[in-house]
Amino acid sequence: MKKIIFGLLCIFTTSTLSFAQKHEIGVYAGVSNLVGDIGKTDYLFPDISTFNSIYGPPVNLGGFYKMNFNPYQGLRFNLSYSNIKFQDYLAKEGYRRMRNNSGNNTILSLESIFEYQFLPVNNEQKEPMFSPYIFGGVGAMLYSSTNTTLDFSNYQLVDAIGAFTPPTIEDYPEEQRTMINKLTMSIPFGVGLKYKFNYNWALFGEITFRPTFTDNIDYSNIQESQVRVLYDKEIVKAIRGGNTMLSKEEIDTIIKPYLESRKVGNLNSKDWVNSVALGVSYSFGSPPCYCD
């Protein structure tokens, strides 16, 4: 009985693993696209005529390591860089073209992705083979954002008796911005086509959609924690007496109109970072079957 069970396990291992090249590494390059509150709303294919704009080309560059469980399934780890652009004048919507906002962002992504091939393209076959595939997983994105300082040092924020006198939006000073890095999560998924033309080598192309957990990749929805207010604390303390300064509620009264003036688009939707890429991969390593 033990020999029968062992034999069945060995057959299963042979059919699912022994012909699958266990390890795969590769690189890819393509174009990236943002679906957000600024710029085009197309989910794929940025306008390549803007490659030479001041924001640089909308590229997506990366590499990966994949562990193949069998000829059909594998777990892939991607590391990629993207430069994304968002330019209102390229949008189809008239209100976006009239608004004419623009900008760019750079993103570093680390993703863990499960991949399923519809044909056994990960086999050690010597004949060329095509296979469509689907994939999905989770990812982390490091993107650029801003911290903003509003300097009211030359504005009287309290009157002669110490009452708070909030500024009108026309009184707001020119904002001072500092670039920072922020982290968000993404849910990458998509489809691809793989062509294994050699015992070890393959070409592939894929389309990836990445819904994120932030609405600020295009800087359209900054948070209250990203805004700091400067003012002359000594004058406020001298008028109010003691160590009394502006309260949190008074600071919030200053910040909120600024935030409202900066918000753009639908604040209930999150940004998507999508890409179309072509790549090449190299497979190696085949687990043995220890059968007698």
Image: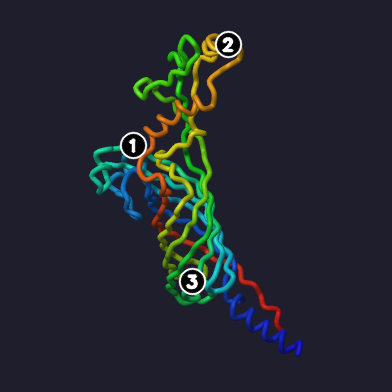
- Picture residue at 50% right of the left edge, 35% below the top: 180
Residue ranking furthest to the right: 2
Q: Mark 3 points at which residue?
A: 117
Mark 3 secondary-structure assignment? strand
Q: Nearer the viewer, mark 2 or mark 1?
A: 2
Earlier-in-chain disc, 3 versus 2: 3
Quarter occupied by residue 166: top left
Earlier-in-chain disc, 2 versus 1: 1
Q: Name the residue under label 1.
A: 54
Disc 3 residue type?
Gln
Crowd class of label 3 (few under 14; some 14 to 19; many from 20; radius 10 Å): many
3D distance between C-alphas at marks 3 and 2: 73 Å
3D distance between C-alphas at marks 2 and 1: 52 Å
User: Which one is nearer the viewer's eye here, 153 or 83?
Assistant: 153
Earlier-in-chain disc, 1 versus 3: 1
User: Which one is nearer the viewer's eye here, 227 or 79?
Assistant: 227
Disc 2 residue type?
Gly
- Picture residue at 54% right of the left edge, 23% below the top: 247
Question: Does the residue at mark 2 contact the one at mark 1 (Cβ under 8 Å)?
Answer: no
Position of residue 130 in the picture relative to residue 199 (left or right): left
Q: In this view, does 261 lie above or below 198?
A: above
